[in-house]
């Protein structure tokens, strides 16, 4: 009997990080190709060369820098034209120094102001590693401990943590394992104070999981680290960072509060449109320790050099070798994936080298940081178009490849084409979903099998049964991709190099076929419904209309101020319905089954999964739903009722993304129970924290991927509720096995 088994849902690593490719041919830009404005790299202050990082092999012979710059400049121009990016600034790093900086395009499109190596951009979240380095410098000074408790350091921060959960430490905050939510909003750009009300912002925030048991990217955690830096150093946050990192590395153009000179050198923010770009209002994060600091590529290139130099870059040391090693060491889940968060930076170990990386994005600006230990090369790239993140990641990868002395040519999609197209390829086509990544789309395009995820695109080249190699501009050597099949032999998922599995959505036929609208009256019309349970419930209205042979729809969500917003990709296949709304991190997908005048299914957004139910307006199903809502909202009856028993056997399922897992709950008492999940090999696993409070029931299943926390409501012979694990929320429903109890019959 297994008692230590876990709910194995989706891996926490990101599939697209394994693919990491950028489309090389899009629409041409309206403007002529930008001109690079190179400038010589500033010479570092003379100092003894730093010791090489522990266990780091010597760097290979240096590639010819002129050849590297020529090839990279051509590639940057090509990608800028394809993606309509106004300006790009690049710093190349080799060994312990910045060896080249250059800029391309226009910092101000209207004024036609060329970008130069001195142009200032927003860092976005690529400043988080600098914050982490400041924290570690305070550790080196003996003023702070990585294991210090948040509750001791900031006693005024009152988190609504669950009983028995371990305390959140500095190490948890740095590695995004605190369980705190993402946090951060944009505010007017010219207000540059660290919000004094951050304690109030964090007050009564409920962590999504016990610290150290899951991964959830959190800007709020870094906002709190900013306050911790102030308390530990006795200085304003900006001064603490300036003295410990910026000054020693010579990062003179990096500023948290833009000076008049910096404003004069700023690039302006833009968004891509069908015709080119349009300017955006200048905003910033309200918790700027989470990112969004103004800098140049050269300045941040010096920080990349310090990452490669074990905490020094040819001048005063900013970190001890021990702290530099701690920063690039993953404190949690290192045995489960070759990649994940260290302290303030993403760590990817493969091909005999350690890659340190971080991306950044605020409205109108994106950034990419990359440092490769072993080859001892790195790059830092900035741009002023908020959709250019995947492109910058690709530029950084290409730059490091060239600096390693390896050849680079843009990928030719013709090498992935087959004529005729293998019939089996249509079985792979469809939409797949990976938690924390969103949809992975695979389709047959122009004779090739193509994968798109997170703004990246790859061509899949056959490499055996159900095996392919993903190739593209940024994956010259290829990344292995494996399709997974279920017991019936049908394609059920796709797995990348890191082991992350994206599960196939049940509407694969609808998402790969040109499906015409169903007969009139089947789906078109007005619908009203909700997503979620209890306090998580969100009411919405959906209006479906016919446009020729196809369907279109708008959605209204009053609680979010959303009114008549157009829905994308409304697809219908038999009884299955799929539609999408929003884009990027705001992308919401609904997959539902049509049952007469009722739509039932699941909404997925940003790693969360919630049950959805909608009814045709004016139908009997809608009237019955209204009666149920009224009964649920009515004051409780004072008449004595037979209590509904929790003890007994319950059976049902858990909506775990694209699949449903069968559950069996055996309750021996209101405080003792076991859980079985046949598909996961779990047989009567002992549950923790089992309790009942009236109609509310709670139980938890221990798991290395994060404590699985179940909360439900007992209604007659049913228990409906949600499972929260590693920041994701899924719905479950159980029915009493063998019929209703006497109390349940009385409660109906």
Image (cartoon, grey):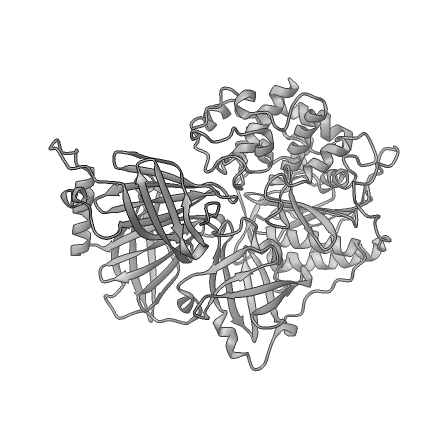
Left or right: residue 653 versus residue 355 is: left
- Nearest the viewer among 96 and 682 is 682
Quarter-wise, where is residue 669 in the image?
A: top left
- Nearest the viewer among 40 and 516 is 516
Q: Which residue is drawn at 15% across and 55% down?
A: 620
Image spot of residue 694 (x, y percent): 25, 34
Quarter-wise, where is residue 261 in the image?
A: top right
Furthest-left residue in this view: 639
Q: Residue at x 70, y 65 (%)?
A: 410
Q: Considering only vertical position in the picture, is 485 above or below 77?
A: below
Q: Can residue 478 be seen in this view?
A: yes
Q: In which quarter of the image is the C terminus?
A: top left
Q: Residue at x 64, y 17 (%)?
A: 234
Image spot of residue 153 (x, y percent): 56, 21
Image spot of residue 74 (x, y percent): 74, 59
Q: Considering only vertical position in the picture, is 731 above or below 578?
A: above
- Nearest the viewer among 170 and 405 is 170
Furthest-bottom residue in this view: 420
Q: Is residue 185 visible?
A: no
Left or right: residue 725 versus residue 342 is: left
Image spot of residue 570 (x, y percent): 37, 62
């Amino acid at each position: 009997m297994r008692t230590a088994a876990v709910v194995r849902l989706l891996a926490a690593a990101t599939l697209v990080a394994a693919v990491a490719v950028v489309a090389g041919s899009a629409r041409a830009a309206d403007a002529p190709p930008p001109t690079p404005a190179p400038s010589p790299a500033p010479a570092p202050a003379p100092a003894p060369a730093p010791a090489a990082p522990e266990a780091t092999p010597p760097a290979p012979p240096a590639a010819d820098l002129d050849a590297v710059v020529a090839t990279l400049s051509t590639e940057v121009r090509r990608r800028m034209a394809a993606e309509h990016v106004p300006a790009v600034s690049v710093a190349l790093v080799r060994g312990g120094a910045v060896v080249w900086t250059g800029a391309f395009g226009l910092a101000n499109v209207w004024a036609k102001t060329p970008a130069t190596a001195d142009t200032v951009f927003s860092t976005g979240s690529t400043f988080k590693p600098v914050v982490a380095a400041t924290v570690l410098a305070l550790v080196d000074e003996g003023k702070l401990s990585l294991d210090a408790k948040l509750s001791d350091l900031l006693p005024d921060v009152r988190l609504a943590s669950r009983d028995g959960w371990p305390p959140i430490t500095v190490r948890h905050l740095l590695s995004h394992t605190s369980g705190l939510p993402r946090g951060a909003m944009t505010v007017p750009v010219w207000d540059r104070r660290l919000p004094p009300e951050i304690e109030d912002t964090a007050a009564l925030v409920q962590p999504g999981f016990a610290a150290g048991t899951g991964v959830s990217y959190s800007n709020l955690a870094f906002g709190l680290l900013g306050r911790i830096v102030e308390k530990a150093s006795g200085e304003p946050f900006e001064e603490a960072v300036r003295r410990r990192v910026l000054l020693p590395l010579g990062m003179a153009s990096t500023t948290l509060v833009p000076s008049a000179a910096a404003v004069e050198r700023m690039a302006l923010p833009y968004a891509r449109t069908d015709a080119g770009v349009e300017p955006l209002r200048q905003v910033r994060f309200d918790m700027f320790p989470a990112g969004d600091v103004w800098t140049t590529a050269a300045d941040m290139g010096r920080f990349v050099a310090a990452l490669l130099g074990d905490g020094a870059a040819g001048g005063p040391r900013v970190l001890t070798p021990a702290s530099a090693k701690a920063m690039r060491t993953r404190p949690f889940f290192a045995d489960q994936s070759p990649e994940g968060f260290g302290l303030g930076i993403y760590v990817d170990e493969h091909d005999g080298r350690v890659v340190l990386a971080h991306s950044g994005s605020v409205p109108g600006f994106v950034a990419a940081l990359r440092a490769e230990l072993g080859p001892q090369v790195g790059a830092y790239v900035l741009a002023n178009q908020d959709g250019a993140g995947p492109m910058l990641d690709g530029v950084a990868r290409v730059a490091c490849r060239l600096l390693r002395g390896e050849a680079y040519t843009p990928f030719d999609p013709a090498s992935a084409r087959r004529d005729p197209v293998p019939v089996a390829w249509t079985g792979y086509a469809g939409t797949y979903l990976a938690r924390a990544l969103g949809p992975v789309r695979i389709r047959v395009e122009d004779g090739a099998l193509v994968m798109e995820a997170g703004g990246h695109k790859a061509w899949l080249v056959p490499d055996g049964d159900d095996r392919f190699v993903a190739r593209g501009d940024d994956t010259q050597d290829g990344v292995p991709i494996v399709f997974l099949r279920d017991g019936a032999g049908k394609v059920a998922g796709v797995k990348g190099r890191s082991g992350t599995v994206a599960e196939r959505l049940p509407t694969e036929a609808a998402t790969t076929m040109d499906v015409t609208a169903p007969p009139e009256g089947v789906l078109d019309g007005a619908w009203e419904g909700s997503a979620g349970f209890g306090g998580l419930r969100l009411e919405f209205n959906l209006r479906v209309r016919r446009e020729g042979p196809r369907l279109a729809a708008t959605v209204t969500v009053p609680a979010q101020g959303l009114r008549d917003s157009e829905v994308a990709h409304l697809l219908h296949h038999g009884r299955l319905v799929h539609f999408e709304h929003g884009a990027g991190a705001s992308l919401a997908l609904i997959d539902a089954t049509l049952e007469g005048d009722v739509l039932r299914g699941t909404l997925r957004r940003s790693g969360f999964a919630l049950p959805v139910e909608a009814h045709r307006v004016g139908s009997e199903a809608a009237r019955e739903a209204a009666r149920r809502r009224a009964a649920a909202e009515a004051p409780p009856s004072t008449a004595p009722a037979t209590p509904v028993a929790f003890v007994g056997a319950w059976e049902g399922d858990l909506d775990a993304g694209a699949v449903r897992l069968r559950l069996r709950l055996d309750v021996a008492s209101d405080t003792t129970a076991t859980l079985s999940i046949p598909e996961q090999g779990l047989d009567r696993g002992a549950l923790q924290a089992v309790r009942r409070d009236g109609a509310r029931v709670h139980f938890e299943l221990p798991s290395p991927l994060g404590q699985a926390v179940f909360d439900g409501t007992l209604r007659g012979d049913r228990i409906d509720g949600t499972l929260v694990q590693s920041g994701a929320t899924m719905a479950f429903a159980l029915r009493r096995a063998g019929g209703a109890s006497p109390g349940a019959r009385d409660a109906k």
